[in-house]
Amino acid sequence: MLHTREIIHKIWDAQGYGNLAVWEDGTTAVIAPGENPVRDGKPPLAVFKPIPLVAGFPMLDFATHDADLLQHIEKTIREAGGEIVRD
């Protein structure tokens, strides 16, 4: 099961390095923009672009407690068929 705040933390850490791919099993990878990764024959549930999502927050704590960002991450994962909980 995926955890919302853990994903936001990983998105935060990926800033300036690339996008964050998230698979159903919780595996993540920082990938180059435009890259289409596959793990064990499966594409990621979602690929998040860090700069538009978290660059406006002065600190990670603000991002992990922003209701709109939490809902956006959860909606994206659920719409892709994944399970996610807010931790």
Image (tube, grey):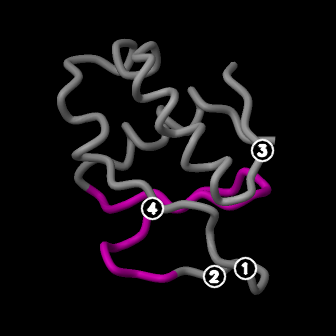
The mark found on residue 72 in the picture is none
Which circle, 1 or 3, is nearer the viewer?
A: 3
Q: Are marks 1 and 2 in contact (CB under 8 Å)?
A: yes
The mark found on residue 30 in the picture is 4
Q: Nearer the viewer, residue 66 or 64?
A: 66
Q: Position of residue 6 (x, y in %)?
A: 59, 32
Which comes sooner in the sequence, label 1 or label 3?
A: 1
Which circle, 4 or 2, is nearer the viewer?
A: 2
Q: Residue at x 42, y 43 (%)?
A: 11
Please name the residue that numbered disc 3 is placed on: 83
What type of secondary structure mainly makes up the magenta span? loop
Which comes sooner in the sequence, label 4 or label 2?
A: 4
Query: Please, what secondary structure does the residue beneath circle 4 have?
Result: strand
- Relative to 82, is 61 on the left or the right? left
State which region is magenta. Answer: 17-36
Q: Is residue 29 above or below residue 35?
A: above
